[in-house]
């Protein structure tokens, strides 16, 4: 699920996830927005490991708020351990400083988030039947979606360089010591290989129709314009637009103010249709209630899918 900030992505994600669970599936709703609100929506504490949120009609719904910082730290700890084995003691301090700097570099959180998304995606088929991702507002998510392809190429080049430097180092160390000593290098290579495979699998998943993108919008001109850009960008990325949810539709029968809003929305939708003919489109009315808690989420789920 994706869309502009505040249009209802988190609410709709949990609603749809609940509806899928109510059909007997094991579903995970995963928030990739660093500003998590899944826990607030459900009024329970949700963290970096899945927690059980509901068990409707024989199904199961779990939730997780993916934490790139925790992923980054796990990753850094592994790299640090490998480096400590590879490098002589006197270089440890400098290497650690270098690694700390790398952790602050632009993009490191995004790639850690992507790694975590990939690890959650891998749970489909084993622990879960379906994973619903509740994403961050448009720009952030689009960048993230285009990353698997870019990172695969990048890792490819890194591996090619590694191949060369590995051969060089093996040759050097066997010259110096008279024996072959390339074990820690291989460990790094394996790490890079695993990453490449992960990102390549993810790129396949998001482009071969195993995954679909549901775009959430509201029926106002500015959000609809951003929505149109999102739909165009998904097309460029080869990602299937599985459906569109137009949220918070104003009722036309509840007073002059809402009647006027409703007319504006009709006009905006006529000018900027949010979905091509044939793409499933669902509207959700503006609701008077506070929408937090399991009961309201279940209700939204049935409104969206019933
Ligand atoms: N149909 C609706 N009627 C009334 N209020 C709604 C409706 N859908 C969502 N809301 C409310 O709108 C607010 C924003 O919803 P939500 O957090 O789901 O949006 P979001 O797109 O995930 O936001 P963000 O971009 O900040 O992640 C919440 O207070 C939610 O309860
Ligand atoms: Mg949200």
Image (tube, grey):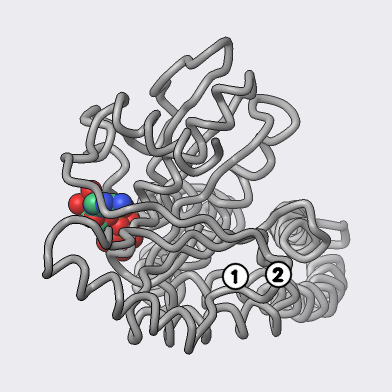
Where is mark 2, residue-wise? 239
Q: For residue 182, which quarter of the picture?
A: bottom right
Does the residue tagged 1 have its C-beta within 8 Å of any atom of ligand 1? no
Q: Give whichever of 203, 237 is nearer the camera.
A: 237
Q: Is residue 182 visible?
A: no
Q: Residue at x 55, y 63 (%)?
A: 244
In the image, is 109 to the left or to the right of 231?
left
Camera-near label (2 vs 1) is 2
- Which residue occupies 71% across, 54% down? 211
Q: Are marks 2 and 1 in contact (CB under 8 Å)?
A: yes
Which residue is drawn at the image coordinates 53% and 75% (left, top)?
A: 274
**Of 223 and 172, which appears nearest the observer?**
223
CA neighbours of label 1 inside 10 A, class few (<14), some (14 to 19), many (20+): some
Residue nearest the observer in this picture, 155 or 287: 287
x, y (%) of residue 299? 37, 31
Residue 145 disc label: 1
Which comes before the other along the chain, label 2 or label 1? 1
- For the question of whether residue 277 can be seen, the reply is yes
Q: Taking 169 as reference, is 74 above or below it? A: above
In this rendering, position of residue 201 left or right of residue 140: right
Can you say which quadrant of the picture contains the C terminus?
Answer: top right
Q: Position of residue 294 (x, y in %)?
A: 31, 26
Q: Position of residue 259 (x, y in %)?
A: 21, 68
Is 29 left or right of 11, judged from the image as shown? Answer: right
Tell me the SS state at disc 2: loop
Above or below residue 273? Residue 240 is above
């Amino acid at each position: 699920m994706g869309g502009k900030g505040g249009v209802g992505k988190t609410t709709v994600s949990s609603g749809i996830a609940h509806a899928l669970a109510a059909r007997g599936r094991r579903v995970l709703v995963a928030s990739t927005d660093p500003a998590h609100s899944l826990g607030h929506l459900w009024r329970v504490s949700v963290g970096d490991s899945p927690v059980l949120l509901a068990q409707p009609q024989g199904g199961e719904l779990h939730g997780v708020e993916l934490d790139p910082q925790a992923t980054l730290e796990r990753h850094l700890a592994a790299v640090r351990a490998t480096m400590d084995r590879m490098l002589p003691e006197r270089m440890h301090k400098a290497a650690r400083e270098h690694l700390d700097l790398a952790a602050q570099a632009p993009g490191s959180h995004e790639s850690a988030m992507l790694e975590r998304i990939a690890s959650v995606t891998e749970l489909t088929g084993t622990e879960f039947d379906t994973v619903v991702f509740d994403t961050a507002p448009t720009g952030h998510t689009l960048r993230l979606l285009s990353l698997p392809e870019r990172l695969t190429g990048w890792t490819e080049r890194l591996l090619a360089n590694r191949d060369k430097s590995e051969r060089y180092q093996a040759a050097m160390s066997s010259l110096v010591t008279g024996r072959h000593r390339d074990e820690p290098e291989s460990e790094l290579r394996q790490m890079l290989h695993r990453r490449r495979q992960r990102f390549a699998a993810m790129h396949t998943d998001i482009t071969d129709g195993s995954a679909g993108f549901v775009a959430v919008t509201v029926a106002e001109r500015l959000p609809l314009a951003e929505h149109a850009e999102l739909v165009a960008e998904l097309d460029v990325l080869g990602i299937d637009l599985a459906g569109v949810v137009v949220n918070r539709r104003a009722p036309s029968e509840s007073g002059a103010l809402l009647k006027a809003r409703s007319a504006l929305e009709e006009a905006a939708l006529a000018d900027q249709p949010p979905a091509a003919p044939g793409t499933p489109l669902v509207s959700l009315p503006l609701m008077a209630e506070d929408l937090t808690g399991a009961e309201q989420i279940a209700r939204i789920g049935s409104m969206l899918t019933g």
